[in-house]
Image (spheres, rainbow, N blue to C red):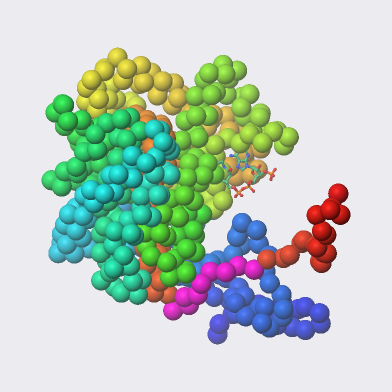
Amino acid sequence: MSKTAKLIFEGKTYELPVIEGTRDEKALDVSSLRSATGLITFDPGYVSTGSCKSSITFLDGEKGILLYRGIPIETLAEKSHFIETAYLLIYGHLPNRKEMDYFSYHVTRHSMLHESIKNFYDGFPSNPHPMAVCSAVVGALGTFYQDQLNVLDEREIEISIHRLMAKLPTIAAYSYKKSIGQALPYPDNSLSYTANFLKMMFSNPCEEYQVDPTVAKILNILLILHADHEQNCSTSAVRLVGSSRCNLYASVSAGIYALWGPLHGGANQAVIEMLQKIIEDGGGVKKFIDKAKDPNDPFRLVGFGHRVYKNFDPRSKIIKNMAHEILGELNVKESLSKIVKSNIDDELEKLNIEESLFDVALELEEIALKDDYFIERKLYPNVDFYSGIIYQALGIPVNMFPVMFAMGRLPGWIAQWKESQADEDFKIGRPRQIYTGNASAEYIPMEERK
Ligand code: CMC
């Protein structure tokens, strides 16, 4: 028998159905609450609100579990590659050989941008934040494919998926190239997804460039770790925009903007800036921990805390181990010198900075994890705490970190958008509010206003 919960309001009893997921989470179905009782629910930040049913990603923040379509993130990071994981998220199952080849072929073949799109890059100021550029260009893609934007047409959705997956690395790399005044290269479709991106980022027409396979492999894992995270801020933005039956490009463009903020995907950039500030300040890590604990100081330890994880984020465990490997065993001096051949001294200098950033990060983590303030509030290092250090070791510029997150999150946004469009409960998203303004007010002519 299905469970119900009772609500007693103004002497009347109402029964509300309880719905259950496949991993025992339970939700009170309040969809008929307003029509039955006149009440709405009030939950700023959606702390206790489920916005949809979804079969894509499961996460248990108390136990530190993250599954894509039922498969643990640790397994995918070890055995899968990003394009396979993207297929899994978007289409719901691991692809067989034929499906994998078909998907890979199209995600590769659509990598070039329409030549007119390059003109957009000339219109931005000289050093725009690449997240703004990426969001603008992704949104504008819709103008190039206006006859293929029907959100109810499976084939048109499929083409949009291929185009977005294929073009985002090109769009992202161009935003960097433009900011440093270099020519916009064409993609190289003979390379893997990550190798192609690295080549577009770091090659120039004057020198031969070989992609370091270790760097491409690390990037592949990072993208897998970021590929989906159920109903986070940017994914909810994608779903909400899509709920007006708005096309995939516009919905993903909104997701990129939502991801940009320092409380979400912009945190990886903010972590590096914070670690640099701690080093420059010279006052030691404890000073910043004390600032973060001070209720009168707005400062927060970026890279700590998560709305859902009240335990170690499984992704940060994987990333932390990778950071140890990259900055230690793998001899980063050697791999860095392969990334940018032109100025080894600069790279070695950067390496020293990275090593000290990593040391400061470790010290910060150690002190915070023993501190009652962080223990009581269950504040653990999140995925952004270490990812920035790795991106920097790979030679990715700091303002590109959120873009790396966006490239990783793209299949998740697509999967969630696609699922929402086909949802039998599909409705335009439209929350309600509790109005707290003037109950009524008069219009006062200008001459009589104080
Ligand atoms: N440093 C210091 N105190 C913190 C921090 C922090 N990083 N995070 C939360 N707290 C405190 C907060 O002040 C509050 O204390 P009190 O109960 O005394 O008022 C308590 O912990 C609960 O915080 P909250 O703001 O109610 O928690 P939330 O679930 O609304 O916010 C968060 C989650 C991620 C926005 C927040 O932890 C934060 O601002 N972290 C720093 C930014 C960051 O690292 N963001 C990346 C998130 S993970 C990747 C992603 O989702 O994109």
**Ligand 1 quadrant?**
top right
Residue plotted at (76% across, 62% down): 436
Quarter of the N terminus within the rendering: bottom right
Looking at this view, name the residue that lies furthest to the top: 345
Q: Is residue 340 visible?
A: yes
Q: Nearer the viewer, residue 165 or 127?
A: 127
Position of 73 with respect to 147 (left or right) is right
Q: Is residue 280 left or right of residue 168?
A: right
Q: Is residue 253 magenta?
A: no
Task: Name the residue: 62% across, 39% down.
Answer: 374
- Residue 280 vs 427, above or below: the answer is above
- State which quadrant residue 185 falls in: top left
- Against 107, residue 354 (above or below) is above
Q: Main secondary structure of the magenta part?
A: loop
Can residue 67 be seen here? The reply is no
Q: Which residues make up the magenta segment?
A: 424-432
Q: Is residue 227 above or below residue 241?
A: above
Tally the marks.
Answer: 0
Q: In the rendering, at what x and y percent does residue 232 appear?
A: 50, 55
